[in-house]
Image (cartoon, helix red, strand yellow):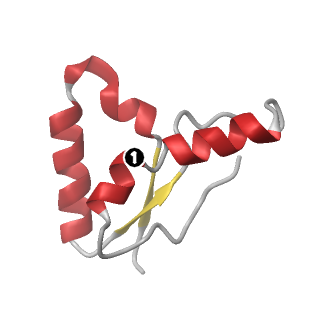
Amino acid sequence: IPAVGFVNESRIYTDNNSDNRIAILKKWLGSGYELGNQAYSNKSYNLVSDDEYFDEITKGERVLTSLMQKYWPRYLSAV
């Protein structure tokens, strides 16, 4: 795998530009690269409860799941 892009889904929805950002993610996948879930807003798991962190992970899969129907994000970044 040449590169994996880790996605913070909260950033997809900034500046009312989500369609353009999703198009970039599709192009990334179409170029043979992979995407990984970096949770919704990349909160530090050291600063939140386990439940809140797992909610962040689940919330961070909304767009990725639809984009990667053929592939499942194999990578999860924990910061």
Q: Is residue 45 visible?
A: no
Q: Residue 70 at x, y = what percent?
A: 30, 76
Q: Give left or right: position of 67 versus 38.
A: left
Residue at x-position 68% and y-position 45%:
54
Kind of residue sitting beneath label 1: Arg
- Looking at the image, residue 59 sits to the left or right of residue 53; the answer is left
Is residue 73 shown left or right of residue 51? left
Name the residue at 33% across, 22% down.
14
Q: Residue at x 75, y 39 (%)?
A: 51
**Numbered disc total:** 1
Within 10 Å of the Cα at label 1, are there few (<14), some (14-19), or many (20+) other Cα atoms?
few
Q: Nearer the viewer, residue 37 or 59?
A: 59
Q: Quadrant of residue 27?
A: bottom left
Is residue 34 in sight in this rendering? yes
Counting from the top left corner in percent of width and height, residue 2 is at 39, 77
Residue that badge 1 annotates = 62
Q: Is residue 44 left or right of residue 75?
A: right
Going by the picture, which residue comes out furthest to the bottom?
A: 1
Identify the residue shown where x is 32% and y is 71%: 33
Quadrant of the rendering where the N terminus is positioned: bottom left
Element type at marker 1? helix
